[in-house]
Image (cartoon, helix red, strand yellow):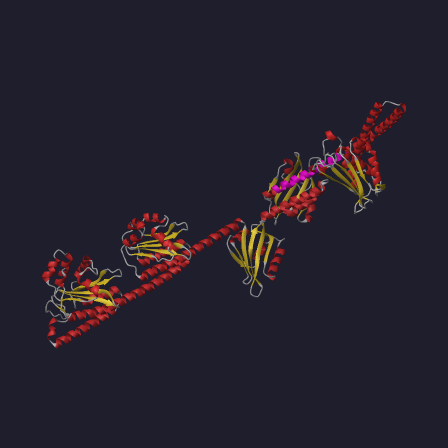
Amino acid sequence: MPEPSLEPSTEPTGETRPPSAVTANVVSPASQAGARGACAAEEGRFAFLARAGEALASSLDEPTVLRQLAELVVPDLADWCAVDVVTPSGAVVRRAAAHRDSALVPSVYAIAGRWALREDGSLGVAHVLRTGEARLIPDVPEQVFLEAARGNESMEDTWRLGCRSVMVVPLVARGRVLGCLSLMSGAAGRYGEPDLELARELARRAALSLDNARLYGEARQAQARTARLQAVTASLSRAATEDAVAQVLAREVWEASGATRVAVLALEEDGLVRPLRVLGYSEDALAAFHRPASGAAREGIQCIRREAGWFGSLEEFVARYPQDAELARSHGQGARAVVPLWGDLRARGLLLLGWPEPRVFPAAERAFLEALAHQCAQALERAALYEALRERSERLRQALVTGDMGTWRLDLVHGKELRDAALNHLLGLPAVDSSLPVGDLLQYLHPEDRPHVEAEFRRNQREAPGFFEAEFRVIRRDGGVRWLHSVGQSFAGPDGKVTELTGAMADVTRRKEAEERLQLLLDASRVLALRLDDVEAALPEVARLVVDHVATGCLVDLAAPDGTLRRVTAAHRVPEHDARLHAALGGTDRGPAHPALQCFQTGEVRFLSHVDFMRCEDFSTSTGHRALVDHLSPTSVLSVPLRARGRTLGVITLFTAEPQRTLVAADVSMAEELALRLSVALENARLFHDAQSAVRLRDEFLSVASHELKTPLTSLILQHNLIGRALESSGTPSLVTGRLNTAQRQVFRLTALVDNLLDVSRLSLGKLSLERAEVDLAQLTRDAVERLEDVFAQARCPLQLELPRTLPGHWDASRLDQVLVNLLTNAAKYGAGHPVSVRAGVDASDEAWVEVRDQGIGIDADALPRLFGRFERAVSERHYGGMGLGLYISRQIVEALGGRIDVDSQPGQGATFTLRLPRSAPLSVAAP
């Protein structure tokens, strides 16, 4: 519509001159003729404003205020009117309309939609909204308007509604243009200056009412947001998981913001986003949420201090994040928001919002949504902490269950005993946490352990706070016996008295049982080793060890010569039952199903993990046996054969009775190991006795044989001597004499061997005798060396003697001479071609010593420990000969005299033998 034809003209003074001389009056235009009419008109204006003020003040609801404003104007001031307001986004929206003909009200709204009212778009409305100044067009020229409206349906409709006279007044409050009031009349010249003033006053009052309504609405919204925040806080306080937090946030944002799309995304530490709660998004969007964060999401994550992103339209969003343009367009043209959810240290996730239409985000709405996001971030942080706590608690619970452990706490102030589910499970109770009176646990203690555990408990209450630990048995509700290891600490209150004890208990049954089994095997092995010569006499001690460690009772039966079982020993935890067990269950007092008898007959283990008392009749053929079985009430029985070299030597039987635990598979393995050790010990004892008998027979034979050989050898030596004298007197050639000497040397050697064998037999039989007397060891050594001069000469061994004039002592001269001869002979044999030194003296402890040192082949280090053994040799018999008895006999003689022989040697550097003897007979050594 052309502006010049529709706008009023303006005089140079600034006053508006209407295009026609029509004067408008709200009551009657003709009343201006006189003062009476003017007064009446003024009164009418006041009355109208009074009604208008009352009507506008009657409500604080914006739509109601605008509707009442439109209804006040029609028909008193206009044929029809429209109320247009400026939205926060800057758009002009028609919020109220009225017409004399109510049927035409929709047309008033329709033309506003077709005109697309904007501050810079419509005719008088644009100017008023832009400048805040009222506009008056008293008379709209019909011809000009219709020419301008030709082809414009909206303008044609406006003319048909009636617009020959127009007023547009702004709604201004607190310096802001809130909208405008348009008044239309179908009569030309209907409005004049008085009407404009009235309209301005009405608009002023209406603007105040509208502003008050908006302020009230904002206050209500703020109150509602506060109430919603409080409700959200309460809901989030009950949300312990991130899914529950996301559900609360999505629901509240959906209801409060009017958004049609809401997504709450969690951010993983690896950069992936995971949807927690999604409303209104498509399947493609859901798939995109599972990809690594990018674009708006990544920026929202990375910018810890950056505010949320608020985008009033699609264009704003795409301009900021062009990489997300394709996905954003699929969500529509409306506004959207990206609000990071930040915890104390890192981003916990994102809140994505979308609206179907472009919009402006008021500061209050932004603050409200950001407050919701902040609360959600804190709740997500709490949920993460709760989840971490749950995971740790679950890991702790699993660790406790896996490790057979439980925790406890004694609150001495309130008299409460707190046990966790794991500890109750150990006790055979329902696996739940419990709070019971202090001392409830004591009822489960084993009767044998209760006194010392109660004493320890009382001591920890009396003494200063500190750590403590104990091991004891408990009897579970199902009757099972378990070992528990308890560690804890006591705490004191301000007065220094213990107020609390807390700790943990671990089931160490398997360890204790393994320790008991191992200790039993060790103790049994030690007992058997000490009684190798009489194992049967050690069996009662072994049976007592079994009872002390693993069983209630133990029976040992061995095979009799007639093939039956004979009871050797029986032991019970109650010693008074030993004799009854031995008598009532011994001999043939066994039924055909008796485990020991079946074990002996088959050679296989018989294990009854749970004794069926209905079968006890088969165990025995005597009433006494059955009565004893009923009295002892065994709960498990184990019989293991004692086998060696394919023979069953006997049976060992173990049984348990309440309150002791029943035997298990591990006890079977232990019993088999014990039976093996008993079998080996019994077999070794038999072999030992057989070997002793054989040795005794051998030694007796050697003794007899040596004596028998001694007689012809003595006779042979005498004959050689006689022949030698005869040859000397007859002048026999030296060849014959040499051969006779050779024969004599071999006879002497054979005599020495026989003497050695005789000495060995005497030593074995304990018949080696000593005849002590005063002996000069220095002279005895000189004599031995002198007798062996030919031996050293033949071995080409120069002799070096360093002997004192005398070296007296109390010894057996003949036996000591035998030792010296052995040492000197060995030096000549193994040191051939090298010097041999012989020294003697007395040391500081008044011990006499004789040292024989050669520079021969020496002795290997690994041969030194066995050098003095019977029949032991450090060198090849082929090269040096001998029986390996000389050093053995020498050591036995010297030790019988209370002394010792030491040797020091290295290969290739010779050997040094040192004989050390006390000069007087030791009190602890008596001659046999």
Tell me residue 399's x, y (percent): 51, 50
Residue 897 colored in magenta in the image: no
Residue 60 visible here: no
- Check the image and name the residue furthest to the bottom: 35
Q: Nearer the viewer, residue 313 or 434?
A: 313
Q: Is residue 662 above or below residue 468?
A: above
Q: Quadrant of residue 26?
A: bottom left
Which residue corresponds to the image point at 34% horizontal and 51% vertical from the top-left?
295
Which residue is nearer to you in this view: 484 or 566?
A: 484
Residue pictured at 20% horizontal, 58% vertical: 116
Q: Quadrant of the N terminus?
A: bottom left
Relative to 173, is 23 on the left or the right? left
Q: Is residue 199 visible?
A: yes
Instruction: Check if residue 692 falls in the magenta segment.
Output: yes
Magenta span covers which residues? 669-696
Residue 598 locus on image (x, y percent): 63, 38
